[in-house]
Structure formats: structure tokens, C-alpha cells
Image: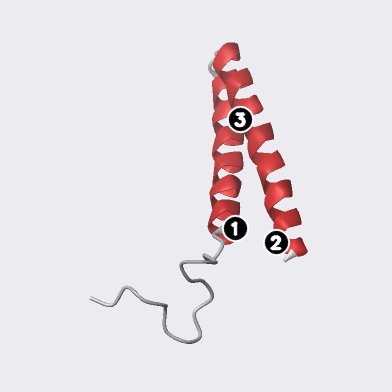
Amino acid sequence: MNLGRQPRGRRGDFDRPYSALTLRLWLAVFGLVACAVLAVLSWRADLDGMAWVLVVLAVVAAGDIVVVQLRRHAR
């Protein structure tokens, strides 16, 4: 079993791992959409407390999208 460096052409290695910002971006977008849809459905079902929690989570996901995009742009 070879535990040395990765083959040529790979972006990351043990000392400088490859960033997973794209995965984090997709997960944040999924979280934003899911929380927004569930918040609307919660309001229609008269579950105001749950709807507000989902709105807060959607805002957090939107903030994460902004942070990820700024970090991707800085690279």
C-alpha cells in the first residue's frame, strides 16, 4: 500500500489538501432551497415556530453561500 504523495496532476496532497468548497457550495444551496420550501409548507400548516426556525436556517445557508463564493473567488 502506497502512502506517499498522490500521482502527478492531482490538486491536493497530505501537506496541502484539496479544498472541498464546491461540495460545500452545493450542500448550502440544497439547504437553502430545502429550508425555504419547508418554511412555506410550515406556514401553510400553521406551524409558525417551525417556519421561523427554517427561515433562520435558510438565512444561515445563504450566508454560507456568500462566504464560499468569496473564498472561491480569492483562490
Amino acid type at circle 2 is: Arg
Label number found at residue 21: 1
| CB contact under 8 Å: marks 2 and 3 | no
Q: How far separated are the C-alphas under marks 2 and 3?
A: 22 Å
* Residue drawn at 41 percent across, 77 percent down: 5
Residue 62's place in the image compared with 21, above or below, is: above
Q: What sort of colour scheme is used for the picture?
A: secondary structure
What is the secondary structure assignment of the residue under circle 3? Answer: helix
Q: Determine which of the numbered discs, if any, sits on residue 4 in the image.
A: none
Name the amino acid, label 3: Leu
Q: Which residue is mark 3?
A: 57
The picture places residue 17, in percent across and down from the top left corner, at 52, 65
Q: Of the residues shown, which amino acid type is indicated by label 1?
A: Leu
Alpha carbon separation for disc pair 3 and 1: 19 Å
Q: Could one spot residue 63 in this view of the protein?
A: yes
Give 31 or 71, whichever is nearer the viewer: 71
The secondary element bearing badge 2 is classed as helix
Q: Which mark is residue 72?
A: 2
Report crowding for label 2: few under 14, some 14 to 19, many 20 or more residues within 10 A (C-alpha). Answer: few
Q: Residue at x 58, y 12 (%)?
A: 49
Residue 50 placed where, x, y %?
Answer: 55, 17
Q: Nearer the viewer, residue 75 or 2?
A: 2
Please identify the quarter of the rendering in which residue 75 is found. Answer: bottom right
Marks 2 and 3, the one that precedes in the sequence: 3
Instruction: Name the residue rendered at 68%, 48% in the picture.
Output: 65
**Camera-side residue of 6 and 61:** 6
Image quadrant containing the N terminus: bottom left
Q: Dot 1, crowdedness within 10 Å: few (<14), some or many (≥20)?
A: some
**x 54%, y 59%: residue:** 20
Contact, mark 3 vs mark 1 (Cβ under 8 Å) = no
